[in-house]
Image (cartoon, rainbow, N blue to C red):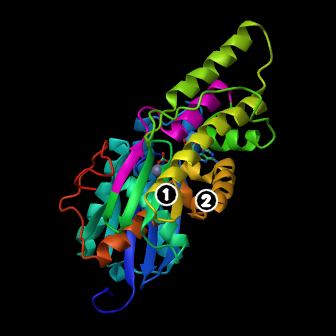
């Protein structure tokens, strides 16, 4: 079944860049359908360490990848010989983790005699939006916010985009995770802070907002993390109780206000009229609500994926792979792990 033959295009996708082992089958004939999207999370394995341990992550990917692949085919009701192309994340991510998905994807593509398409993980996050919103079309601005990256992307067309802003230090999700750790909320911290913030006072604690130079679309979140740490240490030294809910709400407000402000400014300045969110932090209810209000005021359309498609999954990799495939892009040749690749570098 191939696009040239006019039938459905079947993409088998792999995602193992961090601590989720995921395989998906997506099927397209103009619009896209997620036939299966299996995600085996390692979160419990890493929880007692307070963050992802790379060696444990790669070993766990090795154990999970074949069962996850089997389930992806089973749930999709697709036979391997129906696959037209294999898509796989090649970076950014943890090298040992990336290599597991890449090895499985190379083996699958070689055994099936189909092209292997290397996908940049940040590009995949953006494409989660196209999975759920068939009406969404470029140009758009996308704010990708997750544990490892914070990028503001001007997406002119499929395969034609620029990163116009990125974090200069911590990623937004990293800041959520570090602050959650300071507050003793466990890993991953984003969902815990999101939950607590709902019943806290966002104006209770004054925290810095790093807007950087005028006109800049870059971000910085290390200062706010330090401000929370200093505030908590100050209270502890005086033997006072930590107002966890208010601090969670104040921290979240400081982060999402800067994210929203810059994303809105980018969508307005580029004249695209639509803003999309992606990455794990895009699941944050405060960020969604704030951007819904701001976009309504500014006359911008706002798109974001369901929470399960915001965090790492292979369906988004399959979606990006599908758009590469129908453009005739059969990948980057010999696809290798590039742990520190950014979106605008060649090979993305
Ligand atoms: O996209 P993702 O699954 O993995 C990376 O590519 O990094 O994002 C994981 C990040 C973690 O930092 C997690 O704390 C954050 O997304 N996250 C959230 C929420 N859900 C996940 N942050 C804020 N609010 C949430 N509801
Ligand atoms: Zn991710």
Could you tell me which residue is drawn at 69 percent across and 11 percent down?
234
Label 2 CB, ligand 1: below 8 Å?
no
In the rendered structure, does residue 167 fall within the stretch colored magenta?
yes
Query: Residue 284 — which label?
Result: none
Q: Quadrant of residue 79?
A: bottom left
1 or 2: mark nearer the eye: 2
Which residue carries the number 1 mark?
267
**Quadrant where the N terminus lies?**
bottom left
Contact? badges 1 and 2 (CB < 8 Å): yes
Indicate the secondary structure of the residue bearing disc 2.
helix
- Circle 1 — which element? helix
Q: Judge whether residue 104 can be spotted in this image.
A: yes
Placement of 276 over or under 146, stated as above or below: below
The quarter of the picture where residue 155 lies is: bottom left
Toward which corner of the image does residue 246 lie, by quadrant? top right
Foreground pick, 214 / 137: 214
Question: Split into 4 quadrants, where in the image is the C terminus?
Answer: bottom left
Question: From where the camera sits, is residue 15 visible?
Answer: no
Q: Position of residue 223 (x, y in %)?
A: 53, 25
Measuring 76% from the left and 7% from the top, which residue is drawn there? Answer: 238
- Whether residue 281 sits left or right of residue 344 in the image: it is right
Residue 215 as seen in the image, left or right of residue 186? left
Percent position of residue 173, x then y = 54, 41
- At label 1, counting other C-alpha atoms closer than 10 Å, the crowd grade (few under 14, some 14-19, many 20 or more) is many
Residue range of the region highlighted in magenta in the rendering: 162-184
Q: Residue furthest top?
A: 238
* Residue, disc 2: 298
Crowding around mark 2 (Cα neighbors within 10 Å: few <14, some 14 to 19, many 20+) is some
Q: CA distance from mark 1 to mark 2?
A: 10 Å
């Amino acid at each position: 079944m191939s696009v040239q033959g006019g039938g459905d295009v079947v993409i088998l996708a792999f995602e193992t860049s961090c601590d989720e082992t995921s395989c998906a089958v997506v099927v397209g004939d103009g619009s896209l359908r997620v036939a299966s999207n299996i995600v085996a999370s390692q979160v419990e394995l890493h929880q007692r360490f307070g963050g992802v341990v790379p060696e444990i992550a790669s070993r766990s990917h090795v154990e999970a990848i074949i069962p996850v692949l089997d389930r992806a085919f089973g749930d999709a009701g697709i036979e391997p010989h129906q696959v037209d192309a294999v898509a796989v994340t090649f970076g950014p991510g943890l090298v040992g983790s990336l290599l597991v998905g890449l090895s499985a994807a190379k083996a699958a593509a070689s055994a099936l005699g189909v092209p292997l398409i290397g996908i940049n993980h940040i590009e995949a996050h953006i494409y989660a939006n196209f999975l759920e919103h068939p009406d969404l079309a470029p140009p758009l601005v996308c704010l990708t916010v997750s544990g490892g990256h914070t990028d503001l992307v001007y997406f002119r067309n499929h395969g034609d985009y620029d990163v116009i802003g990125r974090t200069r230090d911590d990623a937004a999700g990293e800041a959520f995770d570090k602050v959650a750790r300071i507050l003793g909320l466990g890993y991953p911290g984003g969902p815990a802070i999101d939950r607590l913030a709902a019943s806290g006072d966002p104006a209770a604690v004054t925290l810095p907002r790093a807007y950087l130079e005028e006109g800049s679309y870059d971000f910085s979140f290390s200062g706010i993390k330090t401000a929370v740490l200093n505030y908590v240490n100050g209270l502890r030294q005086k033997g006072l109780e930590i107002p966890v809910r208010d601090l969670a709400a104040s921290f979240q407000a400081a982060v999402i206000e800067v994210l929203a402000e810059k994303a809105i400014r980018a969508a307005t300045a580029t004249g695209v009229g639509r803003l999309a969110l992606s990455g794990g932090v895009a699941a944050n209810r405060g960020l969604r609500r704030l951007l819904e209000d701001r976009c309504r005021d500014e006359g911008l359309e706002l798109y974001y994926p369901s929470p399960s498609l915001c965090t790492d999954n292979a369906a988004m990799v399959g979606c990006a792979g599908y758009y590469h495939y129908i453009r005739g892009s059969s990948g980057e040749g010999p696809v290798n792990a590039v742990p520190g690749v950014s979106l605008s570098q060649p090979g993305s």
